[in-house]
Image: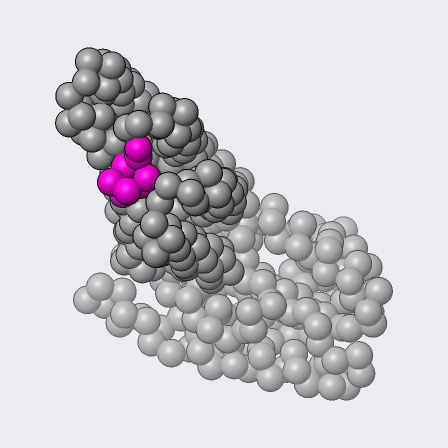
Amino acid sequence: MNDATKKYAIHAAQLNQLLGSNARTLVASTSMVIILAYTQRAIVANEALFAWVLASFVLNFVRFFFALHCLKHPVSDAGILKNRLNQFRVGVILSSILWGSISFFMFSPEQLELQMFVIYILTGLSAGAVISYSVDIISAMSYTLLSLVPMLIRLFWFGDEIFIAMSVAGFLYVAYMIASIRNFNQNQIENITLRLDAATRENEIKQLAFFDSLTNLPNRRLLIDRLSHALVMSTRTNKRGALLFLDLDHFKVLNDSLGHDMGDLLLKQVSARLLACVRESDTVARFGGDEFVVMLEDLSEDHAVASSQVSAISKQIITSLNQPYQLNSFEYISTPSVGVAMFGEHGQSHDELLKHADIAMYQAKKAGRNVVRLFDFEMREEANSNARSA
């Protein structure tokens, strides 16, 4: 995983965690708005209280539906993801500013119980923000500082000894919260990074186990797994399928004359052309060396129509692979020999189908190469006879 991909993955994980905790933080915030407005209704001007409550409700409403939109419409573009993260931060900052603003019109120095209640709400919300927003240090610190610092400044401004002491204690609390945010954030980012690294290693292991390292096509192991599943589905749905076994003609001559690097280039280009000839639901696998297998699924239930579909795809493959290849400065012509075995009539297991498609491919080579041969059981008898005589 390169640095850009890793950075995108970390931002995606940050945003997902923020969105995941968004609903409960907004419920808590809205509940506190209602409770605080109720307790302050007798000492705060109705116009100011109504404006603050309305602004809080509207902002929480917008933040809720923004999060809902992000969850329903995930994106893979790094730029859009970064914009969404920044937009979430803006929402957090505006919320913290609204909470910080109450120190200017809801804080009565004459009523100690109301002072303590306001401080209690603000410290509780900031402590919750450390937990909910710690995955993003900007959101967590913004909420803590912008909601608490205005109140602490106002306490200090009153000049009374007890207020100054409360202010100093409050600033010590904020410093402790900032240190905690940094530690929580570091731990969160480390956990995200560890999960990403573990997922990357798991994908690499799967890639090595199931895909060819040169062409990135499924290897023999994954092909057999898919073929076994395809045979079960073919029996269940009555949809036909076919296996095409391809071998590149005179591939050894290319390797011996121009080197294995040129052979590798040819194999990569053959892989790309084969993929372009089949549907997304089909499988192209590198079976080994210069051998490829194409598995066609979901063909017609009608034998004649299915045979026609296989014939059309086979001809398309022959035509495509006959086109010249540009191997660095060399133009090279390669041809394939193709053997075909149909699901069911030419075998009920992956072993039978692969064996029979392979036999048909050797019959294509005997017929002069660059042709397609459909398996029949006379071919198997001939192959068995040749094996016994050898």
Residue shown at 42% from the left, 66% from the top: 272
In the displayed structure image, the side of residue 7 where residue 197 appears, left or right: right
Which residues fall within the magenta stretch?
A: 100-108
Looking at the picture, tell me which residue is in the foreground, 189 or 245: 189
Residue 69 placement (x, y as % from top left): 46, 61
Residue 328 placement (x, y as % from top left): 22, 64
Q: What coloring was used for the rendering? A: one colour
In the displayed structure image, the side of residue 70 where residue 287 appears, left or right: right
Quarter of the view holding residue 6: top left
Residue shown at 67% from the left, 50% from the top: 225
Quarter of the view holding residue 70: bottom left
Looking at the picture, tell me which residue is in the foreground, 45 or 296: 45
Residue 126 placement (x, y as % from top left): 36, 31
Looking at the picture, tell me which residue is in the foreground, 1 or 7: 7
Looking at the picture, tell me which residue is in the foreground, 349 or 148: 148
Residue 350 placement (x, y as % from top left): 73, 54
Q: Does the magenta stretch include residue 106?
A: yes
- Image quadrant in which the N terminus is located: top left
Quarter of the view holding residue 54: bottom left
Residue shown at 20% from the left, 30% from the top: 154
The answer to whether residue 28 is seen in the rendering is yes
* Location of residue 157 with respect to 200 vertically, above or below: above
Residue shown at 35% from the left, 45% from the top: 44
The answer to whether residue 78 is seen in the rendering is no
Report the label total.
0
